[in-house]
Amino acid sequence: MAARDRRFGYGLVAPAVIVLLAITAFPLVYNVWISFHNAWYLFPTTFSNFAGVKNYKELFTGGAFLPSLYRTLGFTAVSVAVELIIGLALALALNRKFRGRGIVRAAILIPWAVPTVVSGLLWKSMFDPQNGFVNYILTQLHLPLAHTTWLSQTWTSWGAILLADAWRNTPFMALLLLAGLQVIPRDVYEAAKIDGAGAIRTFRQITLPMLKPALMVALIFRTLSSFLIFDVIYAMSHGGPGNSTQVLAYLNWSSMFVQGGNYGLGAAISVALMVMSLVIAAIYVASFRTEQVV
């Protein structure tokens, strides 16, 4: 009976799996194949010129890949940490009962519903040094940095990009964590209250351990999203000033469509991004699984 039910389940999901493979398998295999060729957009005949691991060697000798990787890792670490802290605080607040909670829950999802490019362009206009809202508010309040050209300096550019990214994606983090909080049985908290556990102790010994499945999902999604960030960088800074905000996804796009159309190098960067994304996801899964076993 169990074997028949299993076969029936496989049969139900088989059409969806076949469609997904048809959509994703060929582009993936073709991308890997191109990464081993000397393929240039302007010279289609070069697509058949086998280059071996030349494109992968260029990643480490070309001078652009490693700095972009370091920037990507740094941005990912900071953005995920900021969004996790704020998202968890929002989730804990929204998990409480208060008047208008439904409206507040819907309202915080508005930034997440805004397309990424639109969000980036919106924040770019807000950081405009002449007519932007940010400098206007700082000027009216007589605060420092009131006359800053935000997107023309390295660290202020990163600050603006981080703020724009956090504004849009923190609600997603909060939503996932809120879903995890709502499946925690209320009687567990009542028992802890009877035992005299304070708020901090309850959070550390009950909320956080029971929130780990949702926390793992949220961290994987947001880490991979931050690691593959492109839209906000493209909309706000175009990798500038200079290459100071150029991340791996932007370098990938630039190699393929700007710098002479080097499809071979761009494909190699794509493969590297895919492998590193899988490694990041595997590390998260292994870490949380180890904690659960212990």
Image (cartoon, grey):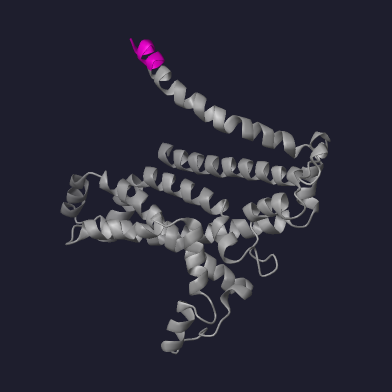
Residue 201 seen by the camera: no
Image vertical order of residue 29 relative to residue 207, above or below: above
Image vertical order of residue 220 relative to residue 193, above or below: above
Q: Main secondary structure of the magenta part?
A: helix
Q: Quadrant of residue 183?
A: top left
Direction from residue 87 to residue 37 in the image, left or right: right
Please name whichever residue, 216 or 248, is drawn nearer the observer in this view of the structure: 248
Direction from residue 279 to residue 103 in the image, left or right: left
Taking the spot 53% from the left edge, 76% from the top edge, the residue there is: 128
Please name whichever residue, 69 or 23, is drawn nearer the observer in this view of the structure: 23
Residue 103 painted magenta: no
Q: Position of residue 83 (x, y in %)?
A: 44, 59
Q: Position of residue 6 (x, y in %)?
A: 39, 16
Q: Which residues fall within the magenta stretch?
A: 1-8
Q: Quadrant of the C terminus?
A: top left
Q: Position of residue 238 (x, y in %)?
A: 63, 63
